[in-house]
Amino acid sequence: MIILGIESSCDETALAIFDSKTGMLGHVVNSQHTIHSKYGGIVPELASRDHIKKLVPLLDDLLKNNKINLNQINLIAFTNGPGLLGPLLTGAAFAKSLAWSLNIKSIEIDHLEAHIFSAMISEKNLKPPFVSLLVSGGHTILSLIEKNSNCRVLGKTLDDSAGEVFDKVARHLGLSYPGGPEISREAEKIQKSSYKFPRPMIKSKDYNFSFSGLKTSVIQTINNIKLNKNSIADISHDFESSIIDVLITKTIKASNELGVDNIVITGGVSANKKLRNRFQNEAKLKNIFFPDIEFSTDNGAMIAYLGWIKSKSHFSNNLEINPDSISRFF
Ligand code: KG4
Ligand code: ZN
């Protein structure tokens, strides 16, 4: 079965083709970072317009590069939420009308669920149950994915998500969007930081997170000094370590307390190299899984892959478009 995956929930237009016999054939991502960077955040209307512009040429490229003909596609999977409604509508309308014109089925995919299962694209032997840490721009959720793939939320952020705080602190440091990779690059320039920012809720008995106090503490520090190359690296280093310390401590605690040794870390922040290395080193007795780096941030491959898994139980062949701003999975 050949599945086309379409992702348009935010500021990435991303498509992929998955072959259930041979695996992921190819994927394309167009990021709109340069469009939104001058506004300091994503402008939904501009995002929708750019998705409309890019969907057809990206699909053409994807098909051409992988020598696939439109008529070979058997199913179209698309992100139905959560996300920005305008961008979701563009992807849903495109997916449904293409499926209708090809006389094939389409399937609605939850973006967060797709992130969580993205590690299974390359880790063929990975199966639930596992402890899942989903860390993206919009969400920080620790959950147990049970044997039947149902999700039991253990904890989530009470305020800002980890990715959001990376982006906001980066802006105050004069770095560009997305902030995570920028901060990471700065942090790598030094071995040790002279700062020691708070590690919020690291010792709390629950599995919740809170990052807005850390954000305020870092921004206050920035406002009280004259920024230069050295101080940007110095602040980035400990800020990044603070987030990683909290994420690792809470995730390992959940794994120990639940007696579940498989841990899966997904979402944009899971692209962070220090996070990846430290998880592997500090959780040696656990089995740690990450998606391939290119599938950590938003992509169409995770949508196509989950579309295939889900197609065994449900799909739709109507033209109703019903995107959701909140997740139906959590
Ligand atoms: O999953 P994603 O692409 O989009 C959402 O679903 O939100 O995540 C985007 C987030 C951004 O906040 C970005 O700064 C962060 O992931 N991110 C990183 C890294 N790469 C992307 N954070 C830390 N380190 C990275 N290398
Ligand atoms: Zn995402």
Image (cartoon, rainbow, N blue to C red):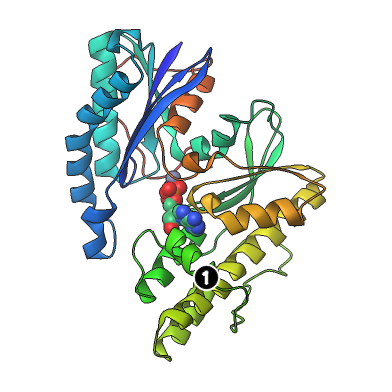
Residue identifier under label 1: 189
Name the residue rendered at 47%, 86% in the picture. Answer: 221
Report the side of 93 relative to 155 (left or right): left
* Residue nearest the observer in this picture, 175 or 87: 175
Q: Is residue 119 visible?
A: yes
User: Quick check: can you spot residue 138?
Assistant: no
Which residue appears at 71% of the width and 30% of the height?
147
> Circle 1 sits in a helix, a strand or a loop, which is it?
loop
x, y (%) of residue 88? Answer: 30, 38
Does residue 94 appear left or right of residue 252 in this picture? Answer: left
Left or right: where 258 falls relative to 93: right
Which sits in the foreground, 21 or 103? 21
Q: Residue at x 36, y 39 (%)?
A: 324
Left or right position of 101 against 237: left
- Residue at the (21%, 54%) spot, across then down: 35
Callout 1 amino acid: Lys
226 or 199: nearer the viewer: 226
Query: Does 177 appear above or below 290?
Result: below
Q: Residue 229, position in %: x, y?
A: 42, 79
Residue 49 position, x and y percent, is 17, 42
